[in-house]
Image (cartoon, helix red, strand yellow):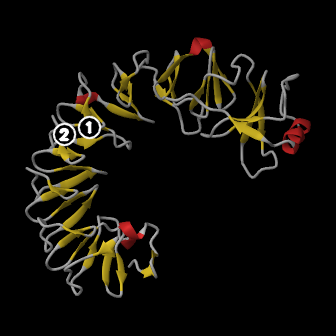
Amino acid sequence: MCTRNGTHSLCSRSAASSYDKESDGWYYGEKLQSIDPESFHLLFAPGSDNPCFADYAADKRHVYMGASIFPAADPATFKVLGGRYSRDAARVYYYDKVLGGADAKTFTEISRGIFKDSKHVYADGAPVENTDPATFSFLGDTGGLAHDATHVFYDMSVIPGINPKDVKYLGRGYWGNNRTIFFEKNSLAPADPATFKVAGEDEIAFSAEDKDHYFLDNIVSDKSSCRKVGRAAVACKNYILASLHKYSSKIDPASLHYLGTAHLCRDIEGTMIYEDKHGIYEFFDGGPIMKFINFPPGKQSIALDKTLERRLCSHPATQSLEWDNP
């Protein structure tokens, strides 16, 4: 139970957004009026029991949403469903509004924030057009790709012209059939379905490839103008792909080369060291490229030896390089 200490809530949320009990009654920012103290209790969505994150409560007379009475709701049968949905024996609600036409008896969650009843699939408090609730289901673990008997959906929008019977989720946001590959909602026209494969989790320069291309999300790079450089980078004509980001400036793709892996006096395992004609860099798995600022351009190294490692360790100052916006 959340309680206050003087005027401060002990919950991680502010006193204005959690239920708190004081000696003179219950509060949700302001004091709740007309409650029955004996039957008053907090209500939780399935899988949640943290009182500091309860937004609903009830007593034998009323349901409360925050500090306000929820007049339409039946406290005897009211349940919090999650995703701002709730129901009682007769109605379904989204926030504090009745979800017109929804069937309370069959209203159930399909995936996080997505619900269905006997007639519709619902997202953001509204029925989703062209969905068949009897056959609707999600594919993969993204929560984005779904299908029913007649349509394919991404983020609850129909993807036209795709047969739902032959769609497969491939991983890392990619999906498709034997004719077309997609990243999320976007068709990757150059992709060859016959040779397309999603990169393993240990690949951090790109996310997929086929015989002719590297793919980073929906960025397509022609292999004929690119080269793989160490574990963390692909150097192309005018940009590099590194640690799952695209960099179009600050690094020279033509002279970029991998020196080796080191700890560099830090408790960071597997720091990858690269160099180009402009300087020396740290590449991290998924993080930004860091340039050593005390190493001006000069004669380039061939490999990361102990002498260079000691120099980097004694001059560890770096600056972060900005990657391209998607």
Q: Position of residue 126 (x, y in %)?
A: 18, 45
In this view, which residue lies farthest toward the right?
307
Q: Characterize the local packing of mark 2: few (<14), some (14-19) or many (20 or more) Cα atoms within 10 angstroms.
A: some
Task: Tell me what residue is drawn at x 88 percent, y 22 percent.
Answer: 299
Nearest the viewer among 128 and 59 is: 59
1 and 2 marks in contact (CB < 8 Å): yes
Question: Would residue 123 appear left or right of 5 to someone viewing this image?
Answer: left
Q: Is residue 298 above or below residue 287?
A: above
Q: Position of residue 271 (x, y in %)?
A: 73, 41
Q: Quadrant of residue 238?
A: top right
Say above or below: 140 vs 109.
above
Q: Amino acid at mark 2?
A: Val
Badge 1 or badge 2: first in the primary sequence = 2
Direction from residue 266 to residue 253 in the image, left or right: left
Q: Position of residue 310 (x, y in %)?
A: 89, 42
Which residue matches tag 2?
A: 128
- Please tell me whether residue 14 is drawn above or below residue 260 in the rendered image: below
Quadrant in which the N terminus appears? bottom left
Q: Nearer the viewer, residue 292 or 147?
A: 292
For the point 29% across and 64% down, the residue is 45
Q: Quadrant of residue 49?
A: bottom left
> Which residue is identified by label 1?
156
Q: Residue at x 88, y 44 (%)?
A: 314
The picture quadrant where one finds residue 318 is: top right
**In terms of secondary structure, where does tag 2 sit?**
loop
